[in-house]
Image (cartoon, rainbow, N blue to C red):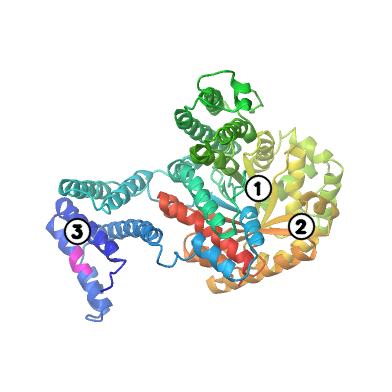
């Protein structure tokens, strides 16, 4: 007799549903419970063909408004609990695959993908090279559809932990009873908690919410992900992941996305970057403290002893210095949060990730040299692998603004000299911009230092550029231009960056989203690549963002999907014609209307050649919690992105 692998999921849902029913009786009385059961029973009968839909309509019609609200809440809570159970079951099924070596590997796991690529005849050297050079960046964004409060998410995570506890075969009966009691407490607490934030979250609230994913799961999921990838790569090719490799990195729009959001000010952007830097310093400080407790060995290499002297516990001496510098870095960022000022290089704080990595690599070499390599490849290696991924900033913040706002800013600047940039045709705009760019931007640079007299929106654009110039290195990622349609839209941002002194300049990413803009994307890029100054600027690489939301609103889902697909084909073609490597940045959300869908399948469905070892993609709103709230789910998400990009690169559909 075969065992249903999904029976544990059904059992979990049944238990959670029963506990929710108990809560409904206690909090709403038997009448509420019976109303919910009546709706549930009739719904099942309609679905099974035992009753007509009219019966369900009438059942709902007979409810008072107050009762209907309570019934709707009950079903919403049940579905939320079922989602938690399903997430935990994904973890359970993954463990089942890993526990049983006689079964085929889990679909799209490292073992599955690498074995299929080998079977397809991909040379081992090519496979190893592609694994170690691919670059995936997941960009976390807030979204107004995200309404679940952080306090409820914490309770939901606790329920998931209690479900995991129930999988232990060695629980005693008292422990099982206690687990059920805790589940009942959490479900009752959720029912009695207001689901909705009654105050609109500020951009900085969104930033802090985004930091939770890093602190609770991603900080630990990344090194575990890389450890698993390293083991699978060794097994498949005999090669290891080289030092300093970070196939997956993270970006953010929280605190930098000012497109249509007047609350995202230059000051918000500064604080968003500082909050991320503070979190990074704090997480590193905790990890170094744990590492210092572990490395109690007396024997060390001459190189290490030459650094710390003839100390009894040389690793602890060196790591104490690292920890103290991290604490000073964290304290310095706290001071800046109280009174923002430029972060200047100093021997007292860390301003370059290499400064943090150097003493850790020294410890690693010493441990290997003295025969303690097994220790070096533990917590220390995990810490070293975090640095290329997280840097000192944890996450790089993108800036995003509408193309029209840059046009208005340049028009205001030009009018000070008696010109009207807004009235110029496209070719004349390009000539004006290139004249400034090739001549060190005299007019724009002067305006950037004297912003008095500009209206609020123009001043905001100029001040944002000045903030970008003043932020410490590694804080920012890309500058995304919404509603880009002409080469001048991209050149305008290049000019504003140059005038503000942004060094190194941010890569400028046009976002093509409406159907018309998608159809014109390749033409825009073709004209842009014919500009010698721009070709020198990009160094053979261009990032292009395509948007799913506005295109679906503009043309409908089916038409938008087709336009997105063919636009990617044309973008890849025009980039190839000009010898430019392209990274496509997908602005996807969670819902179907926003481009949502299964991650692995979605990446496999991109046009051949569009995923050439590189990919950027947004993770919006609730999808951040869905994909990264539980450690095992976060690891699986990172694995899916890695294998999907690898397969799409080496075996395009």
| Mark 1 / mark 2, whichever is N-terminal | 1
- Of 225 and 472, the residue lying toward us: 225
Position of residue 42 measured from the top left corner of the image (x, y, whole percent): 21, 73
Position of residue 83 measured from the top left corner of the image (x, y, whole percent): 34, 59
Name the secondary structure under disc 2: helix
| Residue located farthest toward the top when viewing the structure as drawn | 310
Distance, label 3 to label 2, CA atoms, is 60 Å
Indicate yes or no whether the magenta region holds residue 303.
no
| Mark 1 / mark 3, whichever is N-terminal | 3
- Of 111 and 400, the residue lying toward us: 111
Which quadrant holds residue 351?
A: top right
Residue 601, compared with residue 447, is above or below; it is below
Position of residue 579 measured from the top left corner of the image (x, y, whole percent): 79, 61
Name the secondary structure under disc 1: strand
Position of residue 128 measured from the top left corner of the image (x, y, whole percent): 63, 57
Q: Which residue is mark 1?
A: 478
Q: Which residue range is magenta in the image?
A: 36-40
Mainly helix, strand or loop, the magenta region? helix
In the image, is 413 to the left or to the right of 141? right
Q: Nearer the viewer, mark 3 or mark 2?
A: 3
Which quadrant holds residue 615?
A: bottom right
Distance, label 1 to label 3, CA atoms, is 49 Å
Residue 141 seen in the current view? no
| Mark 3 / mark 2, whichever is N-terminal | 3
Q: Which residue is mark 2?
A: 487
Name the secondary structure under disc 3: helix
Q: Which mark is residue 243?
A: none
Q: Does the CB distance between marks 1 and 3 fall below 8 Å?
A: no
Q: Nearer the viewer, mark 1 or mark 2?
A: 1
Q: Which residue is mark 3?
A: 18
Residue 477, compared with residue 238, is above or below; it is above
């Amino acid at each position: 007799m075969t065992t249903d692998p999904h029976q544990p999921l059904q059992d979990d849902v049944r238990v959670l549903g029963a506990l929710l029913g108990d809560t409904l009786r206690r909090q709403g009385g038997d009448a509420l419970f019976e109303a919910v059961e009546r709706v549930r029973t009739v719904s099942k009968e309609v679905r099974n063909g035992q009753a007509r839909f009219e019966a369900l309509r009438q059942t709902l019609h007979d409810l008072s408004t107050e009762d209907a609200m309570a019934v709707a809440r009950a079903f919403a809570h049940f579905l939320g609990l079922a989602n938690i159970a399903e997430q935990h079951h994904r973890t359970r099924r993954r463990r089942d695959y890993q526990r049983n070596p006689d079964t085929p590997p889990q679909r799209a796991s490292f073992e599955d993908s690498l074995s299929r690529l080998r079977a397809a005849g991909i040379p081992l050297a090519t496979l190893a090279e592609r694994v170690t050079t691919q670059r995936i960046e997941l960009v976390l964004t807030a979204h107004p559809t995200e309404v679940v409060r952080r306090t409820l998410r914490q309770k939901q995570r606790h329920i998931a932990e209690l479900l995991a506890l129930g999988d232990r075969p060695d629980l005693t009966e008292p422990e099982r009873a206690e687990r059920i009691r805790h589940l009942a407490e959490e479900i009752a607490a959720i029912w009695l908690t207001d689901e909705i934030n009654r105050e609109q979250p500020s951009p900085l609230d969104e930033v802090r919410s985004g930091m939770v994913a890093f602190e609770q799961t991603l900080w630990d999921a990344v090194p575990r992900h890389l450890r698993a990838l390293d083991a699978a790569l060794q097994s498949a090719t005999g090669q290891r992941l080289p030092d300093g490799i970070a196939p997956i990195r993270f970006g953010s729009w929280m605190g930098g996305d000012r497109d249509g959001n007047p609350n995202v000010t230059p000051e918000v952007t500064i604080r968003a970057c500082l909050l991320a830097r503070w979190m990074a310093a704090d997480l590193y400080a905790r990890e170094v403290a744990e590492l210092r407790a572990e490395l109690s060995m007396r024997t060390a290499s001459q190189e290490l002893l030459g650094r710390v002297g003839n100390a009894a516990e040389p690793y602890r001496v060196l790591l104490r210095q690292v920890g103290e510098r991290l604490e000073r870095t964290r304290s310095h960022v706290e001071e800046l949060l109280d009174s923002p000022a430029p972060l200047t290089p100093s021997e007292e704080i860390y301003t370059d990730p290499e400064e943090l990595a150097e003493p850790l690599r020294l410890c690693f070499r010493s441990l290997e040299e003295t025969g303690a390599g097994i220790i070096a490849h533990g917590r220390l290696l995990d810490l070293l692998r975090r640095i290329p991924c997280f840097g000192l900033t944890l996450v790089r913040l993108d800036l995003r603004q509408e193309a029209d706002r840059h046009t208005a800013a340049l028009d205001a600047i030009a009018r000070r000299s008696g010109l009207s940039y807004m009235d110029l045709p496209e070719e004349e705009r390009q000539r004006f911009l290139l004249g400034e760019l090739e001549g060190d931007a005299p007019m724009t640079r002067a305006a950037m230092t004297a912003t008095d007299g500009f209206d609020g929106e123009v001043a905001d654009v100029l001040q944002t550029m000045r903030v970008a110039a003043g932020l410490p290195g590694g804080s920012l990622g890309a500058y995304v231009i919404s509603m880009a349609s002409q080469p001048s839209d991209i050149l305008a941002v290049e000019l504003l960056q140059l005038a503000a002194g942004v060094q190194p300049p941010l890569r400028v990413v046009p976002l093509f989203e409406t159907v018309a803009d998608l159809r014109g994307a390749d033409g825009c890029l073709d004209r842009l690549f014919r500009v010698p100054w721009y070709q020198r600027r990009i160094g053979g690489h261009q990032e292009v963002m395509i948007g799913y939301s506005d295109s679906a609103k503009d043309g409908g889902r089916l038409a938008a999907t087709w336009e997105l697909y063919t636009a990617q084909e044309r973008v890849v073609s025009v980039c190839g014609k000009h010898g430019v490597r392209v990274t496509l940045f997908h602005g996807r959300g969670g819902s179907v209307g926003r481009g949502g869908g299964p991650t692995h399948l979605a990446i496999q469905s991109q046009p051949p050649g569009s995923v050439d070892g590189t990919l950027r993609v947004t993770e919006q709103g609730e999808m951040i919690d869905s994909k990264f709230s539980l450690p095992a789910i976060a690891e699986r998400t990172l694995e899916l992105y890695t294998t999907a990009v690898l397969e799409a690169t080496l075996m395009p559909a």
